[in-house]
């Protein structure tokens, strides 16, 4: 009954797609359990690069069944566009399964997201404007539209009416926007029903039966730990739970069935959007990390903010997720630095703090305390074992492992599928 959770241990963009894809040949199901098309994974297979936004990375592995769980919010137009793009490149997407309980991102959710973010001005959160937050808000307010609602026009119409009763008042009276027609929304949503139907399933039942039959199930989170709605740098967070607990609620699989929780760590730190970032660099080193690492959001196209590795965040991720292992990515990006600073603690109001402060104000004022490790200049992209790495690169990995609180079981030394050093098997 091996069930594994794979999630981001920083602010997202750590390379989860590569890690999921690497494990794909050994697992039977890959399950996306939260988020929507505000997340992006880049997977390199041979000389082919795939940018995935909503689909699980397992879609690229023929032996694997990809699943979109009940905790995900789905924009059908984005889903079909992504499926069409993969089909045109010869990828078989027919095995995809979608939970009937997953919520639909409606056109009015996208509108509300965009106008609200513009209204906030300098206080904006930095959302992607894709309707993710408003869709989760509708879900909590019990006026959300689920995939299964597309197959009962009466229920669908009632739910759209209920949602637009309030939203149209807000759009017209507060934001001076035109009211959204109920009939137009219903018609658009119904137009997706027939194409979606072959994918819709009771995924909760299916996944639990698979685990009972000793199938291997991998749960894939979007974004990262520090973007978790409960455990992240609130309010500069996403609208769901990328942390390990979200794998259970977002899939319907109980916590006693989870056997391993793998955190993906970048060898340095990045984040997209607004919010505190203690190790952020505004100098030539930050520019170099961005350029060498190709740090541009897969979904947003925005340049990522870059900084040195933050061990305080890594320890926090280990704690709140119960991490059993780390997958360290993009170690090759650090090749060429004579010395590499690592944040080991913060200074807050003149005091040394070694754990992530629970106070939002304290975290905003945290200043990194660095230790400097020797760098390396040798090309590491051809390394196949840990011993193949330069001594200083080995020492860097070991130092990060000790500071972070969980073993590093795999290391990414390049973007390609095969450019990975596996130290301990995940399965």
Image: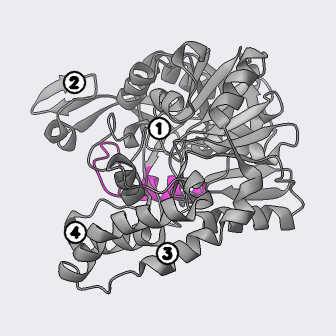
Circle 4 residue: 120
Residue 314 x %, y %: 43, 28
Q: Nearer the viewer, residue 420 or 360?
A: 360
Q: Are the two marked residues, 2 and 3, in contact with CB atoms closer than 8 angstroms?
A: no
Whether 274 is among the magenta residues is: yes
Task: Tell me the CA gap for discs 1 and 4.
Answer: 25 Å
Circle 1 residue: 242
Sequence-earlier tag: 2 or 3: 3
Question: In which image quadrant can residue 81 be found?
Answer: bottom right
The vertical placement of 81 against 396, above or below, is below
Q: Are the two marked residues, 1 and 4, in contact with CB atoms closer than 8 angstroms?
A: no
Circle 2 residue: 353
Residue 366 x %, y %: 21, 38
Q: Residues within 10 Å of mark 3 (few under 14, many from 20)?
A: some
Q: Residues within 10 Å of mark 1 (few under 14, many from 20)?
A: many
Circle 3 residue: 185
Q: Residues within 10 Å of mark 2 (few under 14, many from 20)?
A: some
Q: Residue at x 58, y 54 (%)?
A: 147
Q: What residue span does the magenta drawing correspond to?
A: 271-292
The vertical placement of 412 against 157, above or below, is above
Element at label 4? helix
Q: Are the two marked residues, 2 and 4, in contact with CB atoms closer than 8 angstroms?
A: no
């Amino acid at each position: 009954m091996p069930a594994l959770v794979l999630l981001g241990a920083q602010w997202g963009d750590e390379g989860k797609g590569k890690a999921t894809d690497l494990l794909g040949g050994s697992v039977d199901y890959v399950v996306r359990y939260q988020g929507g098309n505000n997340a992006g994974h880049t997977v390199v297979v041979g000389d082919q690069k795939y940018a995935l936004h909503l689909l699980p990375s397992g879609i690229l592995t023929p032996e694997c069944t990809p699943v979109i769980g009940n905790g995900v919010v789905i924009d059908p137009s984005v889903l079909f566009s992504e499926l069409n793009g993969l089909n045109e490149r010869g990828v078989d997407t027919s095995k995809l399964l979608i939970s009937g309980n997953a919520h639909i991102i409606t056109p009015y959710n996208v509108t509300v997201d965009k106008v609200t973010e513009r209204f906030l001005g300098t206080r904006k959160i930095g959302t992607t404007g894709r309707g993710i937050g408003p869709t989760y808000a509708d879900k909590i307010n019990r006026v959300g539209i689920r995939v299964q609602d597309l197959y009962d026009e009466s229920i669908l119409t009632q739910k759209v009416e209920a949602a637009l009763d309030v939203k149209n008042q807000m759009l017209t009276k507060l934001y001076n926007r035109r009211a959204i027609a109920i009939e137009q929304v219903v018609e658009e949503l119904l137009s997706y029903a027939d194409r979606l139907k072959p994918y819709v399933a009771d995924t909760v039942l299916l996944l639990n039966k698979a685990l009972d039959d000793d199938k291997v199930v991998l749960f894939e989170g979007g974004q990262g730990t520090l973007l978790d709605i409960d455990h992240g740098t609130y309010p500069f967070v996403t609208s769901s739970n990328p942390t390990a607990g979200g794998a259970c609620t977002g899939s319907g699989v109980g916590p006693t069935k989870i056997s391993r929780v793998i955190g993906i760590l970048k060898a340095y730190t990045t984040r997209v959007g607004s919010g505190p970032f203690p190790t952020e660099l505004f100098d030539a080193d930050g520019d170099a990390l961005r350029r060498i690492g190709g740090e541009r959001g897969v979904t947003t196209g925005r340049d990522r903010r870059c900084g040195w590795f933050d061990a305080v965040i890594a320890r926090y991720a280990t704690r709140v997720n119960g991490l059993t292992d780390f997958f360290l990515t993009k170690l090759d990006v650090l090749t060429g630095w004579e010395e590499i600073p690592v944040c080991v603690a913060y200074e807050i109001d003149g005091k040394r703090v070694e754990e992530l402060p629970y106070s939002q104000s304290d975290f905003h004022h945290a200043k990194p305390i660095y230790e400097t490790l020797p760098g390396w200049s040798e090309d590491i992209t051809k390394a196949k074992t840990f011993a193949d790495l330069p001594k200083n690169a080995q020492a860097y990995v070991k130092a990060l492992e000790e500071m972070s609180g969980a073993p590093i079981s795999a290391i990414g030394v390049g973007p390609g599928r095969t450019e990975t050093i596996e130290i301990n098997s995940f399965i």
